[in-house]
Image (cartoon, rainbow, N blue to C red):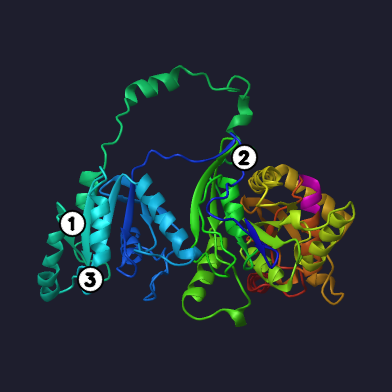
Amino acid sequence: MTTIDNTTIVEPEDELPSAPAERRAVSDATPMVAIIGRPNVGKSSLFNRVLSRRHAIVSEVAGTTRDRLISRASWKGRPFLLVDTGGLEDDPEGNIPQRVQQQADMAMGAADLIVFITDAIQGLTATDEAVAQRLRRTDKPVILAVNKVDNDNRELAASEFYALGMTDTAFISAYHNYGIYDLLDRVVELLPAPEFVDLWDYENDLADEPVEGWEDAGEDAADEEDIPAPPTEMRLAIVGRTNVGKSLLTNTIIGEERSIVSPVAGTTRDALDTEVEYKNHLITLVDTAGIRRPGQVERGIERYSVLRAVNAVRRSDITLLITDATEIATAQDAHIAGLAWDTSRGLIVVVNKWDLVNRNRFRMERVLHRVQERLHFMSYVPVCFTSALTGEGIEDLLDTALSLWQERQKRVPFRELQYLLADAVSTHTPPSQRGNIRNRLRIRRIRQVGVNPPTFAISVNDPKLVHFSYRRYLENQIRDRFGFDRTHLRLIFRPDRDERAPRSGIRSRGSRRTNAAR
């Protein structure tokens, strides 16, 4: 373990802090398929083709993929985990290439089936022969997929790969979607048979178990508005500037080396999804690349890495903004927090590397004040202090995330919202526009229409009359009354459908006809 420019580097032989029994990586019984091969043979292209989406970054630069990319896939009703790996090399030089090889070795060790990718254009190489020799010693099924076979001449030239002696060989083109279906058919055939479950016995066991609280439910159980939404999987996006400890924090939470840790900026490129179980809750951690200022982002791989990080924020429930304890709440941190604000995602500011600063009773107060000052538009954001190196504060961080998640799932009954609206309007009457009483804002009703984030629809006579100060006033009233202390609230002002035309001295056409008849 070394330290360079206040950045702690965990060497391969260093051990991560052991995770407690209540926090562990999810051991899924779903079979795993690993895609391996030397650099720039089209592993990520095949990965994206099977998933039918651009999940892995594809580039002509060799060594683009570094960490293991794991995603769920299925073919003909058979689910499996698909793993994309970095390129295998004979003699990797440097810390990052060596760690890439370790990631590929871990993928092959955990896989139930291996897809060995080669390149028909470059032909059979010494690296291909070395990988094939290694795969002969494994007892796992292996499929040789010769990629970039998109015409008859290349298919004829690709026949030299039969010299590797692989029993299952397929000619494919991931870019042109050639031979992919036949490859997937063979993959499903070679996967281990799924475990048989007797559904009849399972249903009988469930029928014999009493439902807790059913006797005391009464008529209130029929009111769906008072019943909170059932808990589901929580997705946490770990974002921040470069070299703030995002990957090391991910590894510490999981308790194993999931992401490559290096002092080199931009080590993590793709968005890495990892499932972990904590206190009987399923959490998906998304480790992302560091986000630099727009003017500093280089074109190419880094640009796509930033796009993956931004997309991770959009598809997350809660965003963990990782900051450096030695450089608190920079302008770039506020910019990244704005991404969560614009998408109405939950946000937790994580002050990492807390073990590198001189701590006293006033240090934490100054940090909290600095964060609230910089993120003044999100003053309700909780702040956690952690050390990814020592494991300090990890439990408190996960507990805060679960508490925030439950707060974002909270539902408020319609009747209590109406009482709140009556009290708020009577205490502070909506202001009129330019002193004209006819243009005064009139609020009819309020109803919660969604969760995560809590969303409230407010019926008014004219949404244009809602001033931002009164919007903020109503939001604060909801927060104080129902305990929304740390989450973003979404208020939607809609025109009331039952709103009648304001009274005036102008008569309608029907009244004129009635008077004329008289």
Q: Residue at x 57, y 57 (%)?
A: 247
Mark 1 and mark 3: Cα distance apart in space? 15 Å
**Segment tinted magenta in the rendering:** 477-482
The amino acid beneath tag 3 is: Lys
Q: Which residue is mark 2?
A: 228
Q: Give the SS element for disc 2.
A: loop
Q: Main secondary structure of the magenta part?
A: helix
Q: Position of residue 35 (x, y in %)?
A: 32, 57
Q: Residues within 10 Å of mark 2 (few under 14, many from 20)?
A: few
The amino acid beneath tag 1 is: Asp
Q: Give the SS element for disc 1.
A: helix
Can see residue 118? yes
- N-term mark: 1 or 3: 3
Which quadrant of the figure has residue 46? bottom left
- N-term mark: 3 or 2: 3
* Viewer-side residue, 147 vs 448: 147
- For residue 182, the mark is 1
